[in-house]
């Protein structure tokens, strides 16, 4: 039901109702436009009032997102979006809280805040726009830039290995971990909807093209000529197959993944892994596939599991403490126990 109560009446909301009156100031051709459009299109399907929806952002091109949503929004400081969102959700668990951030904002200065948000499992959605570059500050390498990447801040190539955001999220205790891409609108809508409907912290990495400072970083996975043989769309309960003719699959040899071709060596689809999105072991293996030469990049929901959410546990703990100890007094707390006076 796509309705909102306004002065006692019900009105049907559309994508246009979620678009603010602000001019969108991303570079022409930026992948952020697609992400914004898909989010605005699916928002009416959640049956929420705009007054109870909040988008929180840090710093970066992606973090202008709240300006363009006709909801409440918070443009915070660099890397702190997930912390601000956590505090907001604890104080107002009735709100629908979203985080939009970039790979630099979330995984560099915001890395510590990000991993602790995941392990706490508040009921929020985190969308990380990954263009493998710092776009707003004009092209420095980011934590997801590939090894050897030449940028303005790495003129002779980066020395570090990049983060794999999916394995980082999984190892941090994330309860919903997924990946989408800006040029596959339908799949992105479906993935974001699943993340929103998940009870707990939903982390969604979205491959996004920065056509000014890192154009084509994801073209291997987005262009129709190369996409089929280089992408693996993961679906719960379905075999891991890919390729232009759907004749390739992933099987396990012990813990080692292998690519098989159904046209060779008596291989068949029956040899392929049937995906189980509740298996963290399987999610870790699939999330790392693209780290190895020749393997496809996984997209879709890699991991989804039900866990207690932080704000509900906190509320229960507070209620239990009041029952046991009575209602607290701030003045009493400040003037008793381990306190002292400086003269």
Image: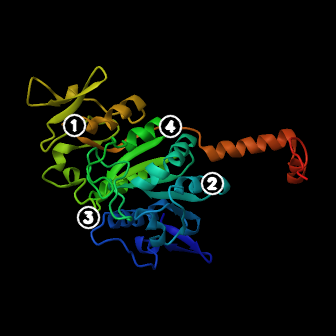
Which badge, 1 or 4, is on the more N-terminal residue?
Answer: 4
Packing grade of label 3 (10 A; few <14, some 14-19, many >=20) is some
Whole-percent x, y for residue 155 in the image = 27, 54
Question: What distance separates the C-alpha of mark 1 from that of mark 4?
Answer: 25 Å
The secondary element bearing badge 1 is classed as loop
The secondary element bearing badge 2 is classed as helix
Q: Mark 2 points at which residue?
A: 87
Q: Is residue 98 visible?
A: yes
Mark 4 in CB contact with mark 2 (< 8 angstroms): no
Question: What distance separates the C-alpha of mark 3 from that of mark 2?
Answer: 35 Å
Q: Residue 211 carries which label?
A: 3
Packing grade of label 1 (10 A; few <14, some 14-19, many >=20) is some
Whole-percent x, y for residue 6 in the image = 58, 76
Image check: 102 left or right of 316?
left
Packing grade of label 4 (10 A; few <14, some 14-19, many >=20) is some
The picture quadrant where one finds residue 308 is top right
Q: Which mark is residue 295?
A: 1
Mark 1 in CB contact with mark 3 (< 8 angstroms): no
Which badge, 4 or 2, is on the more N-terminal residue?
Answer: 2
User: How many marks on residues?
Assistant: 4
Question: What distance separates the C-alpha of mark 4 from that of mark 2?
Answer: 19 Å
Which badge, 3 or 4, is on the more N-terminal residue?
Answer: 4
Q: Name the residue under label 4.
A: 173
Name above or below for residue 182 compared with residue 123.
below
Question: What distance separates the C-alpha of mark 3 from that of mark 4?
Answer: 33 Å
Question: What distance separates the C-alpha of mark 1 from that of mark 3?
Answer: 26 Å
The secondary element bearing badge 4 is classed as loop
């Amino acid at each position: 039901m796509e309705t909102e109560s306004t002065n006692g009446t019900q009105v049907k909301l559309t994508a246009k109702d979620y678009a603010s009156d602000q001019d969108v100031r991303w570079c022409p051709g930026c992948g952020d436009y697609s992400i914004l459009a898909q989010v605005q299109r699916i928002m009416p399907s959640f049956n929420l009032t705009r007054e109870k929806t909040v988008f929180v952002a840090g710093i970066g091109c992606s973090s202008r997102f709240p300006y363009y949503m006709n909801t409440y929004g918070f443009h915070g400081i660099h890397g702190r979006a997930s912390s601000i969102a956590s505090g907001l959700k604890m104080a107002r668990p009735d709100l629908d809280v979203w985080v939009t951030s970039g790979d630099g904002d979330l995984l560099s200065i915001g890395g510590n805040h990000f991993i602790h948000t995941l392990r706490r499992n508040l009921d929020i959605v985190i969308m990380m726009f990954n263009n493998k570059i710092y776009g707003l500050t004009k092209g420095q390498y980011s934590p997801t830039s590939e090894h050897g990447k030449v940028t303005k801040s790495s003129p002779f190539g980066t020395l570090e290995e990049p983060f794999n955001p999916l394995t980082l999220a999984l190892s941090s205790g994330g309860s919903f971990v997924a990946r989408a891409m800006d040029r596959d609108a339908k799949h992105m809508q479906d993935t974001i909807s699943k993340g929103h409907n998940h009870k707990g912290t939903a982390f969604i990495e979205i491959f996004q093209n920065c056509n000014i400072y890192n154009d084509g970083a994801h073209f291997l996975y987005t262009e129709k000529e190369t996409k089929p043989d280089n992408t693996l769309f993961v679906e719960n309960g379905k075999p891991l197959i890919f390729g232009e003719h759907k004749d390739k699959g992933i099987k396990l040899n012990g813990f080692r993944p292998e690519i098989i071709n159904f046209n060779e060596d008596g291989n068949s689809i029956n040899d392929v892994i049937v995906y189980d999105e509740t298996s963290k072991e399987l999610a870790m293996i699939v999330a790392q596939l693209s780290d190895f030469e020749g393997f496809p990049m996984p997209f879709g929901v890699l991991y989804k599991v039900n866990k207690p959410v932080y704000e509900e546990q906190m509320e229960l703990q507070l209620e239990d403490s009041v029952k046991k100890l009575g209602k607290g007094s701030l003045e009493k707390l400040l003037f008793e126990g381990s306190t002292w006076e400086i003269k």
